[in-house]
Amino acid sequence: MSVRPVERSSLVEQTAAELDRIVRSGEWDVGDRLPGEVELGRLLGVGRSTVREALRSLISSGQLEARQGAGTFVASPTAVPGWERHLRRAAIADVYEVRIALELEAARLAAARRTPADLVALDAAMAARGRAEGPAAFVDADLAVHRAVIAAAHNPVLTDVFASFTTALREALLDLVRDEDLRTADDHDEATRAHHDLVTAIRAGDAAAAVLATRHNVEDTLAQLHAAQRSS
């Protein structure tokens, strides 16, 4: 029998394990920006190169996401399965086409299953969307509305699958709202009306109207994403 000696874990592995623990604990929420490498090294008592390698490990697992020029952000509280990481690398329009199918069903289910608490959450999310200033805040608020609709469907599988899409979508949607040639003020107003129509339909328990409002919103956005791909 061949037996190999047990090796002590490296500083990189220990650092990655501690970062993993912090992320899993929820001390850093999904979307939060991590401190810089120097600050993390000071907090963890290790060198910058060790921090960098540990961060790369968690980025590879899908827990963290590096954004060019912005820093490193929490993408998932736990390691992301390989198929979800594939989604994050897939063409954004392809992912969005699948998202449409999910959101149409979520809208139908939400109209049938919404609770008073769900309606309160939807109203709060819409209000936050209306107050949001700047592209990043607006995209995050917009996605929060969609998460509230998904939650109102009360289907945990839909919730998990939608969550796997949001990281893939966020950066593309940011580019979209920043590009005035692709996303005009009229487009923004039309999308806002579609969101209000969706919430109204869910409140009324009108599944057909909820599906129609969702289709109007997400298919318009898909068309804009295709336009963005053609212009890139």
Image (spheres, rainbow, N blue to C red):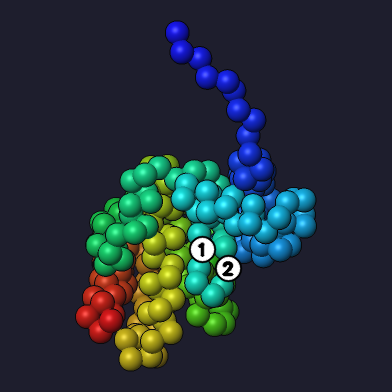
Q: Identity of the amino acid at label 1?
A: Ala
- Front residue of 113/225: it is 225
- What residue is drawn where x is 38% and y is 51%? 85
- What residue is drawn where x is 25% and y is 84%? 231
Where residue 171 is drawn, which disc sits there?
A: none
- What residue is drawn where x is 39% and y is 65%? 169
Left or right, residue 117 beside residue 165? right
Q: Identity of the amino acid at label 2?
A: Gly
Left or right, residue 165 beside residue 136? left
Tally of numbered tags: 2
> Could you tell me residue 230's position as x and y percent?
22, 80
> Could you tell me residue 8's position as x and y percent?
64, 30
Question: Is residue 33 in sight in this rendering?
Answer: yes
Q: Earlier in the sequence, mark 1 or mark 2?
A: 1
Q: Which residue is mark 2?
A: 71
Packing grade of label 2 (10 A; few <14, some 14-19, many >=20) is: few
Q: Which residue is mark 1?
A: 66
> Could you tell me residue 129's position as x and y percent?
52, 74
Give the secondary structure at mark 2.
strand
> Could you tell me residue 95's position as x and y percent?
29, 60
Packing grade of label 1 (10 A; few <14, some 14-19, many >=20) is: some
Vertical placement of 48 versus 219: above or below? above
Left or right, residue 74 beside residue 165? right
- Front residue of 39/94: it is 39
